[in-house]
Amino acid sequence: MNSEFIKRNLSTSAIWLFIVVELIFFSVAGQYLSLTDVAFMDGGNMLLLLKQSAPIGIIAVGMTIVMVNGNIDLSVGAIFAMAGIILLDSLSWSIFSGIGDWVIVVSVLLALTTGVLLGALNGLIVWKTGVDAFIVTLGSMLGYRGLVFMFNGENPTSNLNWTLVDLAEARFLGVHTATWVFGLTVLIVWLITRYTVHGRNAYAIGDNRNAAVNAGIRVGPHMLINFALIGFLAALSAVVFYAGSGSVNPNDGMLYELWVITAVVLGGTKLAGGSGSIIGTLGGVIAIQLLRTGLGYIGADTSTVNLVLGLILIVVLFIDRQLNVKGAQELKV
Amino acid sequence: MANLARKRILTVMGNQGILIAFVVFMVIFALASPKFLSLDNLQSVVRSSAILGVMALGVTFVVISGNLDLSVGSMMSFSTIVVLDLHDKLGPSLAIPTMYLMTLGLGGTIGFLVGYLRLNSLIVTLGMLSAIHGLTLTYSGGKNMDIDDKAGTWFSFFGQGEILGLPVPIILFVALAAFLGVLLAKTPFGRKVYAVGGNSTAASFSGIPRARTVFTCYLISAFCVATAGLIQASRSMGSQNTVGQGLELEVLAAVILGGASLLGGSGTVLKTVIGVLILGFIQNGLLLIGWPFYIQYVITWIIIILAVWLDISVKRGKFWATI
Amino acid sequence: MTQSTPALRLEGIVKEFPGVKALDNVSLSVMAGEVHALMGENGAGKSTLMKVLGGIYQPDAGTIYVAETPVVMSNPLDAKNKGIVFIHQELSLAEELSVAENVYLGELPRKSVGRVDWKTLYEKTDEILRRLKVSFNARTRVGDLSIANQQMVEIARALTVDAKAVIFDEPTASLTDAEKLVLFEVIDDLKSQGVGIVYISHRMEEIFKITDRVSVLRDGQYQDSVLTADTSEEAITRMMIGRNLDLSRAPVSHELGEVAIEVKDLSCGASFQNVSFKVRCGEVLGFYGLVGAGRTEIAETLFGLRQPSSGTILLDGKETVISSPAIAIREGISLVPEDRKTQGLVLGMNCRDNMTLPQIDDMKAGPFVSDGAEVALFDLYRDRLDIRTPGWRQTVGNLSGGNQQKIVIGKWLSMHPKVLIVDEPTRGIDVGSKSEIHKLIRELAASGYAVIVISSEMPEVLHVADRIVAMYSGEIIKTFTSDDVTEDNLIQAISGIKPK
Amino acid sequence: MSTKTLLATAVTATVLMGPALAMAEMRIGITQNNVGVDSYQTTYESAFIAAAEANDEVRAVVLDAGGDVARQIAQVDSLIQQEVDAIIIWPTNGEAVIPAVRRAHNAGIPVVVTNSNIAEQGFDFIRSFSGPDNVTQGSRSAEIMCDKFKDMGIENEAKVVQISGQPGYTTAIERAAGFEDRLPEVCPNVELMETQPGDWNRERSQQVMEAFLTKYDDIDGVYSGDDNMGVGALNAARAADRDGIIFVGATNFSVGYDAMAEGEYWGSIYQSPVDDAEAALQTAIDILEGKEVPFLNYFDTPKITQDNMDEFTRPVF
C-alpha cells in the first residue's frame, strides 16, 4: 500500500518535476543558443508565459472535469471561435448603441451565454441519446464550425474596441488580466472538484458509472452541467483572447482540442475517467507553454516544437504506464 | 404490440439506416441539380473521395480492433512529401517502395506502442499527429515538393491515369476495398481483428496474439495512408507539407458514419465505403446546388449523431437513454 | 422479534419485455425481522424482480408495499429513500474515491452552495464502520482496500438509511469465512432491528445457516414459500427445477492413464510458491481454496498468461516452457477461465465464431475461413454438449449463463486438448445447468482427458474431483484422495491448518 | 525543497556568468506567418536569415507563428519582453495583431509589417510596410488576362472565375480587390462568375476548381491569388480534359513558371521572396539607423507571361 501511495504521488508530481527540468534546460541552453540578453527565468518572461498559457489553460481546466467525468469534448475549438464572433459582433449591434461602453459587459455576457448553450447542447445530446461523447463532440466540432462559417462566410469578424483592448492589456499587481482570469478559473474549478457535491459526483460517475447510477446519482444532468461548464470556459477563453485581438478568423481555435487534451493528459488525468486534478492540468498547461516559449527562446523552429511535443506526450504516457504495471505479476493479456 | 412494431421499425432503420440516408440524399440532390446523377459527376465524386476513402479503409481495421488513429492526416502529408522528394532523387520505381517502407515504419511504431506496449491509442496517435508533422517539416525543410519533369514521368499514372476509361484512383480505391473487405470478412486474420476489438482479454484467453493483431492493423492503416499519399502526390505532382492536415477527423467521421463502433468489434469495409461516399456526395451535391462548403459540416454533424443514435437505439430498444 | 407485519410486500407484480413475460403475477411477503431467501435458476426472474424492487425497472402491473404503504419507485435513490436498500453482487464502488464518499455515494451531506459537509460525512461513516468492526477508516481510498474490505464498504452503504428492507444479492461470493461471519452478524443485527432481509444466493449451506424462510421463483412465476427449518436442499432444488438432482460424490469409475501434466516447485511472485502436482489422463484433479489462494494464478501460469518465477512444467514427461496461450494451446492445454463474460467469450460475436476462435487458423479453405467447416464443427459440439441456441448466428451475449459456459467448453473440446483446466465452471450458473456441466466433466475424464477443476464450492469439488488439492495463501496444504477427504478436513486445510 | 533552491541558485549563477553582452548590435525580431505552408514563406525565411547573417551589425530572432494568430500575438509579446530593437511582422491576420503591434509601439519598439499589410486601424502603430503592392498586383493580373482575351478575340464573351487566397488575409483581399476593380475597366464585357477561396492551398484550390468545372460548362479564364493555387486549378482542368482555359496567377512559383514553359499556364506576377525578405530587413535597419523610410515601401513586382518569361529566372521556390 505504501509503494502504491508513492507511485500515485510520483505520477501526479511528475509534471512539476518536468517543469523544473524544462526551466533548467532552457536557462542553461539559452545562454548558448538564445539571441537575447534577457534571461529565460526573468520575472517578466514568466508572467508573460502565464498570460500566454491562459487561452488554452482556461479550456483545459474545463476539459479536466469533463474527462474526469468520463467524457471528452472535441468541439471546444469551434465553441471558442463562435463565442469570439458573438463577442466582437455584438459590440456593434445597433440595439446596444445607446449604452456606450457598457456594451462590453453585455457582449461578454452574450459570448459566455453562447458558450454555455453550445456546451449544454453537447451535454444534452450525450445525456438523452446515450451516444458516446467522443462521437457527439466530433460531430459538433464539425457542426459548430459550420455555424461559425455561416455567421460571416469565410471572412473574419472584426471589431477593434480600444476600451476592450485596454481592459485586456491592463495589469493588476503586475499580473495580466488573462492571468487573473486563468488563475481564478483554476481556483474556482478546483474548489468545485474538491469541495462540492457536483464535483465529487463527477469523479464517482467517471470512476464507476454503474455504481453512480445505482446509487441514484443522476448521471445525465451532471454530464450536462460539465459540458455547459466547458462551453462556458471555452467562451471565457475566447473573451480573454479576443478582447485583446479584436478579430476572429473562422478557422480560429482549430486543433485547440488537441492541445487542450495534450495538456490535460500531461497533467495526469486518465482518459478512462474518475481520476485527475485541476492542479495537475495547470502543470500540464504550463509545461506545454514553457516548451513552446523555451524552444522559441533557443531558436528552434516549428518542426522541432511539433516533434518534441508529440514525442513528450508519448513518453509521458509510457512512463505513466510503467508506473502503473504490476510488474511480473501482471497478466499477459 | 405498439412496442413490437416500434422495435421492428427501429431494427430496420438501424440496420439499413445508413443506406436509407444515402438514398434520401441522392434523391434530394438529384432533384435539386440535374447534373448530380450524370455519369461524369458520379465518377468525379468517387475520384475525389478516393484519397479519403483509401485512408478510411485502413482506419476501419484500427477502429474494429478497438483503437483509434488520429495520425493518418499528418502521416499522409509525410508520404506525399517523401515520395515527391524521392521521385526526383531515386526515380519513381525506387521512390514508391521506399516511401511505402518509411510510412510502414511510422505505422509500425504506432502499432508497437499501442499493441506491444499497450499505450492508449488516442494519446499515442495524438502525439504522433504532432510528431509526424514535425518530421515532415524537418524532412522537407518546410518547402513545397514538386516533381521537376512533370511530363517525362509515368508517376502521374496513379493519380491521373486511366484504365479502360476508369480513373486509376477509383480503381485503386475499389481494388483495395475489395482486398481489405475480403481480408476482414473472410480470413482468419479478419476474425482475429473482430475478436481483439470485441474483447481483447477473451481473445488473449483464446490464444489470439492481441499485440500482433493490433500491430498488423496499424501496418494496414499505414499501407492505406501510403497509397493515399501516392495518389495525392501523383494527382498534383507537387505538394505542400500540410496536404493531409485535418483529414484524420474526416476519415474518422466516415468510418463512424459507416457504423463502426469506437468501442471496437463492429464495422465492415463495405459500410465504411458507404460512409465515405455519403460524405463525398454531400460535399459534391452542396457544391452543385451552390451552397457553401461549410453547410456540409452542419449536415455531417446531424447525420453522424442520428446514425449512431439510431444504431444504439436499436440495441437498447429505446430511443432515449435513461441515465 | 416480531414476525407479524410485512416489511416488504409484493402483490401481483408483472413485468413484460418484448416477447418475454419476465415476471408473471408475483406476490411475496417479507416480514419485518425476517431473513428471506429468494431462490431460482438463472432466468427465473430473480434479477428482474430485484430491479423492480430497486427502482431500476417499473412494473407493468402490481403494487409494492413498504411497511404496508404502497410505494412507486422511480429510480434507485428513490427506492433507497423509501426504505429499500440493495447490495449488489458485483462491486459497484468508485475506487479513486474515499470510503466515506462511496458509503454516501449519491447522497453526500451538503452545506450551503452545494458544498460537501466533510465533517459530518466522515463522522457518520466512521460510526457505521465501527458497527462493521472493520480495520480501515472513512478516509481510506477504496482502491487501496482488499476485495473483501471493498465488499464491507458495499455493506456499509446499507446502514446509512433507516432501511425497512435490505436486499443482499450473492453477498458472500468473494468473502473469506471470517468475513462471512462478520456479514452474518451484521445481518443478525439488522434483523433484530426489525428490518426485513431478502437474501439471494446459490449457496445452500448459507441458506440453511441464516435464513428463516425460502421463496422460489421459476420461469417468472412465484412457486412457493417454505420455512427453512421445514425443508431440505433436495426439496428446494426440486421446486427450482421441477425434478430431482444427484449431488452425491462420484466415485472413480475408470482406469487412469499416463501422467499428462506434472508441475514441480512452480512459483510465481507473491501469487503462489513451490507448487507441485501431477494429473493423469482420465483423472479430475480439484483445486479447492478461498479466493486469492493462488488457484486461478496457477491455471493462468499453466496456460502461458503468467510467467513463472521458478519451477518446471512437464508435459508427457518433457519439460516445457509455456510463454504464451498460443504455445499452451499447441501443447494441448486448454483453459476455461474464471470469468466467462470478460475472459471466456467475445460477447458481441456469434456462437460459432466464438467456438472456432482458437483454431481459426486451421479452419481454412485456401486463404479463407471455411464456412462449411466452421458450421460443421459448431453443429457437432452443439449436439454433443446440448447447447440450446436458435442457431449459430445467435450473438453469444444473448444466451443464458449455462449455454455460454458450454460454448466456452465446446471451444476447447473441439481442439482435443490433453489437459483441460476449468476455473469455477459453474459460477453464476443455475442448478440445472450446473449438474449438466458436472456430468460433462466426469464424462470428459472418462474419455481420457486430464482435467483440472478449480472451485470455491466444496460440493462441486467433492462431486467431480478424484483428488482434491487444498490451497491456502499460495501454497498447497495437502492433496486429498477419496480415502481421506472429509468436509471438515477440507475446511481446515483451506484455512491454513495442516492436517496431521 | 532544498534541492530546488540549489538548482535555482546554480541556474541564476549560470545566467549571470553568461556570454558577454554585445550592446552595439541591432537585435531584430521577426514573426512569420506560416513557414512550411508553402515554399514562398520557406524561401523568405532562409533569405531573411542569410541576409541577417551577412550583416555583422544584426542579430535576428526568427519566429514562426505556424498560421496561428494566438501564437503570433504571443511571439510579439515575447519579442517585446526580450527587448529587441525592432520587430518585423508578417501578419497571420491583418486585424487581430493590431493590439499586439500597439503594445510594441507603446514599448518604443518600431514595427515593420512585411509582405501583407495590417488593417488601416493599425497604421498609427507601425513605422513602415515593406512588401509588394498587392492591389497593383491584382490590377496587373486583370490586365494580363484581358490582354490575352483580346488576342484571342473573346474579350466580349469570356467568362472567368476567381480562386482567392485565405479570407481575411490582407494580401488576399487586396489582390481580389485589385483584380475585381481593374477587370471591368479594361474588359467591361468579361463576366466574373464566381469567387471561392482556395486558402493559398493547392489541394483546396484543386477541389474548388473541380466544383467550378462541374458547375460551369464554359470557363475561359481563372484568376488565382497565387500560382500555388493556380497550379491546383490547372491540375483540376487537366484531369477533366478541359483545354483552352487561360490561367493567370500571382506570386510566380516555380511550378507556375514550369507550367508556363509548357504552355499550359498563361501568366502571373513575378515576386521574389528574396527581395521581399531583404527589403523588410533593410527597412528595419534603416529605421534603426534613423534614416527616413516611406510608409508604404513597395518593391517592384512585374508581370510575367509566356511571352516574356525568358527575361526572368526560374523562381527557386
Image (cartoon, rainbow, N blue to C red):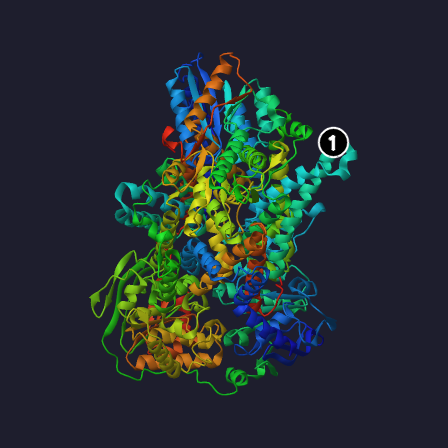
Disc 1: host chain: A
Specify the farthest residue to the front. Answer: D153
As drawn, B46 above or below C395: above
Whether residue A206 is visible, yes or no, is: no
* Quadrant assignment for the C terminus of chain A: bottom left
The reply, left or right, for residue D290 in relation to residue C314 is right
- In percent of width and height, residue A306 lies at 43, 38
Q: What residue lies at 45% left-to-right and 54% top-to-bottom?
A: B48
| Residue C64 or residue C146, whichever sits in front | C64
The reply, left or right, for residue A232 in relation to residue D301 is right
At label 1, counting other C-alpha atoms closer than 10 Å, the crowd grade (few under 14, some 14-19, many 20 or more) is some
Q: What residue lies at 38% left-to-right and 23% top-to-bottom?
A: D50
Say what secondary structure mark 1 lies in: helix
Q: What residue lies at 60% left-to-right and 20% top-to-bottom?
A: D106
Whether residue A116 is visible, yes or no, is: yes
As drawn, A238 above or below B267: above
Specify the farthest residue to the left. Answer: C318
Specify the farthest residue to the bottom. Answer: C243
- In percent of width and height, residue D150 lies at 50, 38
Callout 1 amino acid: Asp
In this figure, what is the number of numbered marks? 1
- In percent of width and height, residue C403 lies at 45, 77
| Residue C387 or residue D208, whichever sits in front | D208
As drawn, B299 above or below C401: above
Identify residue for label 1: A101
Identify the image quadrant of residue C485: bottom left
| Residue A296 or residue A51, whichever sits in front | A296
